[in-house]
Image: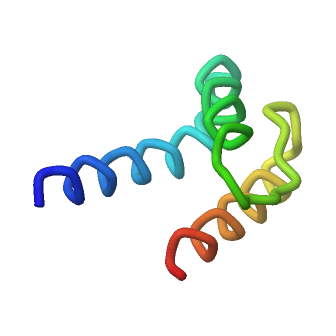
């Protein structure tokens, strides 16, 4: 149970970090995304806001499966 809670917290952090105003935070999200097996998403810290939101929705759907 504690591991599930921790995983949910980590996912919440990732989703928030993907659209964070600080580029360094978005870079950390990008690194984490690259380490996620079977996840294919068009994400880069310098994308425009719409593209960042689109990538975030893709990641949400991936983890909702």
Q: Residue at x 59, y 36 (%)?
A: 20
Name above or below for residue 46 compared with residue 56: above
Quadrant of the image occupied by residue 62:
bottom right
Residue nearest the observer in this picture, 39 or 18: 39
Residue 16, x across and y down, in percent:
50, 46
Residue that extends furthest to the front in the rendered view of this protein: 37
Residue nearest the observer in this picture, 43 or 2: 2
Quadrant of the image occupied by residue 1:
bottom left
Residue nearest the observer in this picture, 10 or 16: 10
Is 6 situated left or right of 32 in this image?
Answer: left
Residue 3, x across and y down, in percent:
21, 51
Name above or below for residue 50 compared with residue 6: below
Q: Residue at x 54, y 82 (%)?
A: 65
Quadrant of the image occupied by residue 61:
bottom right
Residue that extends furthest to the bottom in the rendered view of this protein: 65
Is 55 situated left or right of 17 in this image?
Answer: right
Residue 7, x across and y down, in percent:
33, 52
Residue nearest the observer in this picture, 38 or 6: 38
Residue 28, x across and y down, in percent:
62, 25
Q: Residue at x 32, y 57 (%)?
A: 8
Residue that extends furthest to the top in the rendered view of this protein: 24
């Amino acid at each position: 149970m504690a591991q599930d809670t921790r995983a949910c917290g980590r996912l919440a952090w990732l989703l928030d970090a993907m659209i964070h105003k600080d580029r360094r935070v978005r870079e950390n999200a990008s690194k984490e995304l690259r380490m996620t097996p079977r996840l294919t998403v068009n994400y880069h810290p310098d994308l425009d806001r719409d593209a960042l939101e689109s990538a975030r929705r893709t990641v949400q759907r991936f983890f909702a499966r």
